[in-house]
Image (spheres, rainbow, N blue to C red):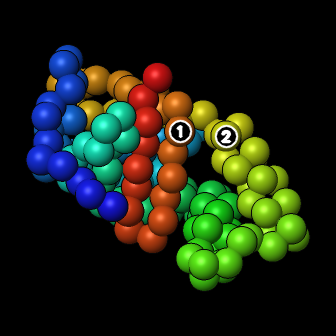
Amino acid sequence: MNVKPFKARAGHATARGGRAVLHLDGQPVGDVVVKGWDGSWGYGNFVPGERFSDYAVLFGTWSLLMHADSADEKLSDAAAQELMQTETRLDAIKSKLFFPKNQQWVDVAELNIDGELLEWKEY
């Protein structure tokens, strides 16, 4: 992954080093420190809070399936089916980032959490 030097997005505090609170389905579930942008994707370090436990298995399953097969092998049919079901469940979660510095809410169109890395795409 090639995270480029940060260009702040107009209107909110998404500058490199900026801090946000991740909300899933209306609940604060952890903190994000913004690292940068790669195209339309924002990247940051994620520190889960207690409420993230309701979502940890789902994101963990997604991560395991994404790394299940080696890079030169095609994903097995069973793993591909499970990945599709997991992604459908993840897509149903309403995700937002709140940047306390300027009280800005950002609606998240897509969200991935892989270990400490969080990546998001805005609407």
Q: Which amino acid does label 1 sit on?
A: Glu
Q: How far apart are marks 2 and 1 (CA)?
A: 7 Å
Residue position marked by numbered label 2 in the rendering: 91
Place of residue 103 in the rendered image (x, y in percent of width and height, measured from the top left): 25, 24
Place of residue 25 in the rendered image (x, y in percent of width and height, measured from the top left): 60, 37
Which residue: 24% across, 54% down? 3
> The residue tagged with tag 1: helix, strand or loop?
strand
Mark 2 and mark 1 lie on one chain; the one further toward the N terminus is 2
Horizontal side of residue 59 vs 38, given as left or right: right
The reply to whether residue 49 is visible in this rendering is no
Which residue: 38% across, 62% down? 117
Residue position marked by numbered label 1 in the rendering: 110
Place of residue 49 in the rendered image (x, y in percent of width and height, measured from the top left): 44, 60
Which residue: 65% across, 63% down? 62
Q: Is residue 94 above or below residue 119?
A: above
Q: Residue 17 carries which label?
A: none
Horizontal side of residue 97 vs 66, given as left or right: left
Camera-side residue: 118 or 49? 118
Place of residue 24 in the rendered image (x, y in percent of width and height, measured from the top left): 55, 42
Camera-side residue: 115 or 40? 40
